[in-house]
Image (cartoon, rainbow, N blue to C red):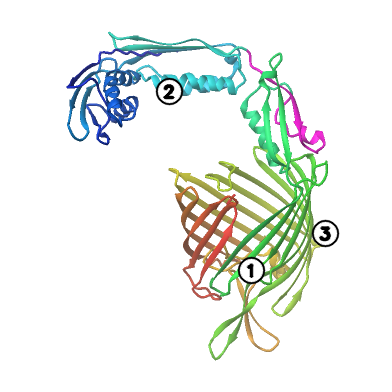
Amino acid sequence: MHRILGISSAVRLHLLLGLGLISSGALAADNFLTVSVTGVDENLKRNIIAHLGSLPDSEVQRRAFLFNVEENVNTALKSMGYYHGEVDGQLKEKDKGPWELKINVNPGDPVIIQWVDINFSGEMLDDRAFDKWLSEVNIKPGDKLNHGTYADVKSQLVTLALARGYFDGDYTQAQIKINRDLNTAQVSLHFDSGARYHFGQVNFEGHTLEPDILEQLIPFKPDAAYSTRRVSALNRQLLDTGYFSNIKVIPQIDLAEDEQIPVKVELTNKARHSIELGLGGDFGQSASNTFEPRVRVTWRTPQINKYGHSQETTLEWSPDRPKFLTTYTIPMSHPLNDQLKIRFGLLRDKYGVTQIYEPEERDFRNTGQLESTKFLLGALRQHGLGNQWLMTYSLDAIHEEYNQSDIDYNPNFLLGGVNFSKTIRGDNTLDPKSGFRQIYGFDYADPFLGSEIRLARLKANFKWIDTFFDNHRLVARIDLAANVANENEIAFIPPSLRYFAGGDQSVRGYGFQELGPYLDYIDNDGNTNREVIGGRYLMVGSFEYQYYLTPTWRVATFVDAGNAFDNNQFEPVVSVGGGIHWISPIGPIKLDLGVGLKETDTIERSWRIHITMGTEL
């Protein structure tokens, strides 16, 4: 591979009443010197200014500054391939105030690269990473010579070689030959990588786990070729277990023997127990006009025993909606890619809106919500499928008690399911700049297996995040779901398995789970009642634009749309709004206002303020 560079130089400097040259479109130092540079483009001007350095702030410094101007401008021109520059300078001395130096530069023709010779030898010849680097190298014949670009290319190759385990690599030739008469240059970079080093023994220190558990987390085979990417993968695997508060993966290059690098891993266990507090709430005008706070306390034990068992227990409270859920996790064949989770929960919740018709007002008045109490005992197993896909299959025993249309229900379900999900994050922060999550699920219950009715549930959830030009962030979300059951058995589907819309993770102009299909019925006292009972289907989407005012503060505006519905009854509702978000050390804290654009048969024009905390992926 060949490329050429040419450089020639003749810099002439003429100063009136002075010694040198200086930089800038308009540089000034109080009471000593001002400088202006003309005749060159912005890139070359900035380079000249950088080489001239800081302006003087004393008479002694001014003399030294002027003395070195010619050499500094000459160096600046040559560094960007101009070896035939002409410089005229005029210096105006003053008894009072700063002296004025005006510089006009004619850079001349630049040196052009004639050919580039990049030559590899050693084991790197069989490493495709260097072929990819070579295809993207940014020096080519016909380019103007730039010594900074040449230095960057040299540095890139050395950095890549070290990252790929070629610790004995070195340049056998690295030079630029310049023909000043022809204004051309020839670049030669010859690199001998030597042998590639391999991973040796991996030793873990500071843990209390069975050694086999940690060995399963090593993402490379014994004697695998060294790369920093594999070192990072080991660090990430250990971090994802949740067992450790501090992880140091240290390749011991100085202890390498026969091109084998031992790896020391220093680990610090997390605290045996941790408590996490979460706060949220929403209020405004909707079916419920009261402030509804939410408090969540999560207790975690990241490592219960040497086999890596862990537990997480969550207590959540909001008015009339207490929830308790505990999950015990057991690593199976792999601590990350194969886990058994056993869970038990007692959850009380409210859904929709209940209303009574008042003849004198000729309208419905809100009386409350549909309430249910749910008991859950289940188990699920998660498998990593590779390429960041996760498969989960589960079996849940559910007993739920609720009153609908003045009738008490207490159905039992044995629900088996399978779930596929994939989450890609652009970074590991609590506020990722980019990412994509997709979830697909299928659940099934059958009377033959002890369930109240035959029920099939399908869902698909998508969330996309991206950031443009550093400060502009977009968040989009789509949630789809469906229940398939006999039309005459819909009432036996408990509220927790139906679909409702509204709330901070749905249509934000409306209250939590208050949107959906309704039915009218006559109660035992002969009154007409209306009750939002949820739908067989769900379709909700959202699009949000966020702008970072600072790295830790941003404003947002959004549009949410969709609803829960039954067959041929889809009536989407839309809300718009905005908010302000603080990117705190424990995750984003959001204050959002949503305004509903449509009245429904059960809710008047609505608005809600939501306070939430937590990452979006």
Residue 321 appears in which quarter of the rendering? bottom right
Q: Position of residue 465 (x, y in %)?
A: 52, 48
Residue 90 image offset from top left, x and y in percent: 18, 25
In the rendered image, which residue does mark 3 sit on? Answer: 449
Q: Nearer the viewer, mark 2 or mark 1?
A: 2
Q: CA distance from mark 2 to mark 3?
A: 66 Å
First in sequence: mark 1 vs mark 3: 3
Is residue 403 visible to the viewer in this orientation of the structure?
yes
Q: Nearer the viewer, residue 18 or 144?
A: 18
- Calculate the distance from the C-alpha at mark 2 to the C-alpha at mark 1: 60 Å
Q: Is residue 247 above or below residue 87?
A: below
Verify CB contact (< 8 Å) between mark 2 and mark 1.
no
Q: Nearer the viewer, mark 1 or mark 3?
A: 1
Q: Is residue 535 visible?
A: no
Q: In the displayed image of the protein, which residue is found farthest to the bottom?
A: 360
Mark 1: few/some/many CA within 10 Å (<14, 14-19, 20+): many
Q: Nearer the viewer, residue 502 or 535?
A: 502
Q: Is residue 23 above or below residue 124?
A: below
Q: Amino acid at mark 2?
A: Asn
Residue behind mark 1:
534
Tell whether position 350 is magenta: no
Q: Secondary structure at mark 2?
A: loop
Instruction: Tell me the residue at 27%/30% (across/down).
Output: 24
Give the image location of residue 372, x and y in percent: 72, 70
Ranked by sequence position, the earlier of labels 2 and 3 is: 2
- Front in this rendered view, residue 47 or 202: 47
The part of the chain drawn in magenta is 195-221
Q: Which residue is mark 2?
A: 138
Mark closer to the chain start, 2 or 1 = 2
- Tell me where residue 473 appears, x and y as whole percent: 47, 49
